[in-house]
Image (cartoon, rainbow, N blue to C red):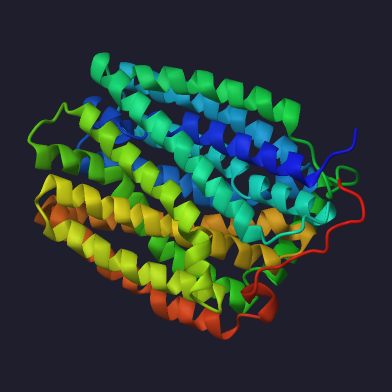
Amino acid sequence: MVVTSRQVRRTYLVLMLLSSLAISFIWGINSLLLYDAGLSNTQALVANACFTLGWALFEVPTGTIADTWGRRVSYLLGGVTLTATTLLYWLAWRLHAGVAVWAGVSVLLAIGFTCFSGATEAWLVDALHFLQHPGPLEDVFAQGQVYNGIGTLTGSLAGSFLAQLTNVGVPFLVRAGLLLILTAVAWRMMHDIGFTPARGGRPVREMRRVLSGSMQHGWRRPAVRWVMLGASLTVGVAYYVSFTMKPYFLKLAGDEHAYALLGVIAALNAAAQMAGGFLSRVFRSLFRWRLSVVISGVLVNAALLVGFGLTSNVPAAMALMAGYSLVAAGIMPSRQAYLNEILPTRQRATVLSFDSMVQSAGGVVLQPVLGRVADVWRYPASYVLAGLIQLLALPLLALARRHETSRAAAPARYEAPATTR
């Protein structure tokens, strides 16, 4: 069967839509599940930091699975793992488990996400390069942001209203069912194209070879290393904001059970994410260099976080968070295209996973620190500090900008093949 680049893009968008729908179904109320189980604010943040720690620890090992056994195998493994661990989350809530149990389940949950990260993006880029897709990568990634926003809007809104009608545990059961559907769709539609898994020989030796190449093409390249380190600050802050803004909005609203409000807020952020995907090309057109887009976005979002911490008005806080989501989604395609244009196929998934690991490491450190600030000086002070921390990423991105090559800077276009694939 002949596969075309259009089919690859369609499969990618379907997977983005279904995965965001399933994953976001509990986003409006996920942190509230831990509080409802009896955990304090600090305990809940420790459990979430363990999730981030698990993400950091397993990013590279699962990335090597994608680079040795195949992107499809890694994705399917992630779908099965996320389904099982989502059910474990629900069980821990039902049993009112202690923080140690939540920490352990959070680490297991992270393994599922690490199987997704790197593998999906590497699968798409490999296939498009092989099929000589005639267009810039930014366009595909921007479409992915839009579909991700559609799924997130639908899932977060539906999950929050379902929790309002039932309880905070039911959306987790629905999410497990959606993840099963996602896994079945991936089994049917996702096949490795333009990449041959290295399944023969000795797996450990092959993984060492891939890891060595990943260090060479990733961490040891200044153009990649500084981008990774900058993201450890911005993404670490984003982890904290995403987790804590739900109880904070409930406090602002004066109703600790206004789950529907959280659904509206999550849907608004998802709509802003979709708008960011649509506007990403506009953002890119304003600058010659891709990293200039990223640097400008980081600066704007730092200001939005400070404003979020300083306001006590619910509509204003919602608008600031929506702006934060819009800018983050709008600059993401430029960052993704920047990295993928300078990474070799054989190590692409592992380096992208290493990038995600570095980001997660920032979350491991920043979440407990900012959580402690919230406990001592309350949430608004922690958000102002989060905005200031995000500014620390600017000199790191500026260092990366000095090493940016013309290939990574400009959108790559490929000549259309003689026949339509």
The residue shown at (55%, 35%) is 17
The quadrant where residue 310 appears: bottom left
The residue shown at (50%, 60%) is 280
Outermost residue toward the bottom in this view: 402
The residue shown at (26%, 70%) is 388
The answer to which of 25 and 136 lies nearer the viewer is 136
The quadrant where residue 219 appears: bottom right
Q: Position of residue 384 (x, y in %)?
A: 20, 63
The quadrant where residue 261 appears: top left
Give the quarter of the figure containing the C terminus.
Answer: top right
Vertical placement of residue 250 versus 326, above or below: above
Q: Position of residue 32 (x, y in %)?
A: 26, 31
Vertical placement of residue 9 versus 260, above or below: below
Q: Is 88 on the left or on the right of 404, as rendered? A: left
The answer to which of 107 and 182 lies nearer the viewer is 182
Count of numbered badges drawn on the protein: 0
The answer to which of 331 and 368 lies nearer the viewer is 331
Q: Can residue 143 be seen in this snapshot? A: yes
Q: Can residue 38 be seen in this snapshot? A: no
Vertical placement of residue 149 versus 394, above or below: above
Q: Position of residue 102 (x, y in %)?
A: 37, 32
Give the quarter of the figure containing the N terminus.
Answer: top right
Outermost residue toward the top in this view: 166
The residue shown at (50%, 41%) is 148
